[in-house]
Amino acid sequence: MGITGIKNGIVHDALRYPLSDWRKFLVLGIIMGGGALPGIADCVLGIKDLAFLGRLIIIGFLIGFLALGYLFKIMRSSFAGSAELPKFNSLPNMYMDGVKFFYSLCCLYNACYFYCTY
């Protein structure tokens, strides 16, 4: 198999995986859209009320943690060998996984930053 075959297989798998279940794909899109509420309100709708945007930023972070938790769940199921999207169940666990994943990414970023600058 040449490079073209590998690329076609990767592209095919990358498109097939998220589109394997439309419901889960749409729910994830709604969650991701909810996490983008502050940007949508500011840029698209032109809302400049800082108190309202502050509330939307907090809501965006809370929804973003849920999205990160589902991303972590996707990675966990992929490492286990599953070829299907995981279910949207146990939202509190998914939310806490998202908070832990965010905290881990922040720690990793800070460690890399301090390593590279000092």
Image: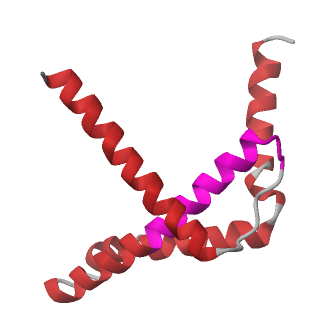
Image position of 50 with respect to 12: above or below: below
Q: Would you say residue 73 sits in the magenta stretch?
A: yes
At 62% from the left and 68% from the top, the residue drawn is: 28
Q: Main secondary structure of the magenta part?
A: helix
* Farthest right residue in view: 1
Q: How many discs appear?
A: 0
The residue depicted at 52 percent of the width and 69 percent of the height is 95
Q: Quadrant of residue 53?
A: bottom left
Reply above or below: 1 against 23: above
**Camera-side residue of 78 and 39:** 78
Q: Position of residue 115 (x, y in %)?
A: 22, 24
Residue 10 point in image, percent of width and height: 75, 31
Residue sitting nearer the eye, 96 or 10? 96
In the shown orientation, is residue 8 left or right of residue 36?
right
Residue 27 percent across, percent down from the top left: 66, 74
Q: Position of residue 42 (x, y in %)?
A: 26, 76
Magenta segment: 63-83
For the question of whether residue 62 can be seen, the reply is yes
Figure quadrant of the C terminus:
top left
Residue 87 higher or lower than 75, as above or below: below
- The scheme the figure's colours follow is secondary structure
- Report the side of 102 relative to 16 (left or right): left
Can residue 49 be seen here? The reply is: no
Task: Identify the residue at horizontal 83%, vertical 20% (top origin).
Answer: 5
Name which residue lies at 31% across and 77% down: 58
Q: Quadrant of the N terminus?
A: top right
Residue extending furthest top? 2
Front-most of 43 and 6?
A: 6
Residue 90 magenta: no
